[in-house]
Amino acid sequence: PIEQLRNAIRACLNGEAAPREMTLTAMNRRGRPVQCKVICTPLIGASQVQGVIVMVDELTDAAG
């Protein structure tokens, strides 16, 4: 789900201070669908955005 992540990362890079949180369906290394919680947080240093921290946590297998 790259497009959904791209939008959240761009929003952080554009200076939106609030973390962006979403739940996405993705594929694990075995090719199985999984639900993931993703949080994108701006990395602020020297009073400007230096980058984005992306944390991904697998919630459950989407199939069960």
Image (cartoon, helix red, strand yellow):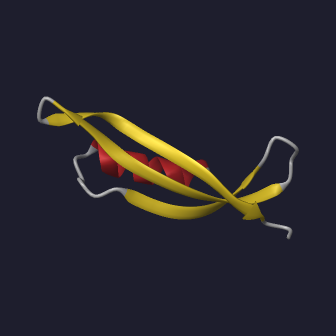
Q: Camera-side residue: 62 or 5? A: 62
Query: Would you place residue 63 above or below residue 49 in this image?
Result: below
Q: Nearer the viewer, residue 21 or 10?
A: 21
Q: Position of residue 1 (x, y in %)?
A: 63, 53
Say left or right for 53 vs 63.
left
Looking at the image, which residue is at 48% across and 47% down?
Answer: 6
The single residue placed furthest to the bottom in the displayed view is: 64
Q: Quadrant of residue 18?
A: bottom left
**Rendering coords of residue 61 (x, y %):** 80, 62
In terms of image quadrants, where is residue 51? top left
Residue found at x 41% / y 40%: 53
Where, quadrant-wise, is the C terminus in this rendering? Answer: bottom right
* Number of dots carrying numbers: 0
Is residue 56 positioned above or below 22 on the image?
Answer: above
| In this view, 9 is above or below 25 | above
Could you tell me residue 19's position as x and y percent?
34, 56
Question: Residue lying furthest left in this view?
Answer: 47
- Side of 46 where 6 appears, left or right: right
Drawn side of residue 19 relative to residue 26, left or right? left
Residue at 59%, 48% (x, y): give it.
2
> What residue lies at 53% left-to-right and 55% top-to-bottom?
38
Q: Please provide percent x and percent y for residue 28.
A: 78, 47
